Amino acid sequence: MGIASGKLHGRVILVTGAARGQGEQEARLFAAEGARVLLGDVLDERGAAVAKEIGEEIGGGRARYVRLDVSREEDWAAAVAAAKEAFGHVDGLVNNAGILRFNELAATPLAEFQELVQVNQVGAFLGIKALAPEIGAAGGGTIVNTSSCTGLTGMAYVGAYAATKAAIVGLTRVAALELAAKGIRVNAMCPGAVDTPMAHPALLDPAGMSEEAREAMGELYRRLVPLGRVGRPEEVARLALFLTSEDSSYITGQPFVIDGGWTAGVSVLP
C-alpha cells in the first residue's frame, strides 16, 4: 500500500494508545496520508508489531513505536525525544489513550475514579504540556484530543469516565485559546460506542451476562442509535485525519460528535 492523497505530507504525528483500536487505525491512516508517525502505548509487543507493519506497508521508515504511559510526565519527555531523534521534529498529537470502567457512581471506589482521572484527564493534559512547545517550535500544527459523547451528555454507570471526558472538552477549549497565536489548532473528538477492545465488549458483552441478556442489550443499543450499529475505529480515524489536516484549517476549540446520531435526540424508529 502506498501513500494515498498525501494530506499529511511532511507532518510528524504522535498518536497515543496506538497499539490497537482507534489509535491503531489513526496511525495507519496518517502514515498512508504521508505522515511519519510515532506510536505510543504500554502494550509493547502489539505496538511494536503495528509500527513494523506500517513500515512494511508504507515504506520509508514512516512509523516508530515508543513505550508511553500517558500518566507519567517522564514518559512524555522520552516520547518527544524519540520523535525528534527519529524524525527531526514533531508537529502533531492525537491524545487517544484512555480507559473505561463501568460502575454506579456512588459505589465507585476512590482508587478507580483516580485511575481514570490519571490516565484520561491528566494524560491529555501532559500531552498538551509536552507537545505544545515542540509543535510551536516546528511552526505550528495540531492537537486532537479524544473525548466522548458521554462527556457532553452524561451516561449512567460511567461517571468517572464521563467526568474525565467532560474535562477533556474544557482542556481543548482552553488550549485552543492559548495556543492559537502559535499556529496550533486544538480540537476534540466525541465518539459514541465504537467497536474496539476497550468499549465494544464492555457495552455489548459484559462478563457474566447470559446469552439472552446480551442479545437484549444489543437490540436495545441498536434501537438507541439511529444508524443502528456501533461505530468502526476507522471512521473515527477519518475524523482525526480531517482535524489534523488542512481540510480543517479554520477550525479550533471544537468538540466533534461521531456517534451514529445517538445524542441527536430520542429515536422513534422501529
Image (cartoon, helix red, strand yellow):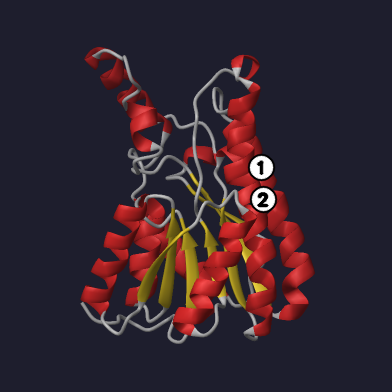
User: Which class describes the residues within 10 Å of circle 2: few (<14), some (14-19), or many (20+)?
Assistant: many
Q: Front-most of 57 and 178?
A: 57
Q: Are marks 1 and 2 in contact (CB under 8 Å)?
A: yes
Badge 1 is on which residue? 166
Measured as percent of width and height from the top left, residue 262 is found at: 48, 38
User: Which class describes the residues within 10 Å of circle 1: few (<14), some (14-19), or many (20+)?
Assistant: many
Residue drawn at x 50%, y 75% is: 83
Q: Which mark is residue 225?
A: none
Residue drawn at x 69%, y 63% is: 129
The residue under label 2 is which amino acid type?
Val
Residue drawn at x 46%, y 45% is: 259
Quarter of the image containing the N terminus? bottom left
Measured as percent of width and height from the top left, residue 260 is found at: 42, 45
Using the rendered image of the protein, determine whether residue 11 is visible from the camera's viewpoint.
no
On the rendered structure, is 137 left or right of 55? right
The residue under label 1 is which amino acid type?
Ala
Which quadrant would residue 91 be assigned to in this image? bottom right
Measured as percent of width and height from the top left, residue 211 is found at: 23, 16
Measured as percent of width and height from the top left, residue 54 is found at: 28, 70
Q: Which mark is residue 169?
A: 2
Q: Secondary structure at mark 2?
A: helix
Residue drawn at x 24%, y 81% is: 2
Quarter of the image containing the C terminus? top left
**Is 167 placed above or below 238 here?**
above
On the rendered structure, is 219 left or right of 40? left
Q: How many marks?
A: 2
Q: Front-most of 140 and 155?
A: 140
Question: Marks 1 and 2, how far apart in space?
Answer: 5 Å
Q: Secondary structure at mark 1?
A: helix
Which quadrant would residue 195 be assigned to in this image? top left
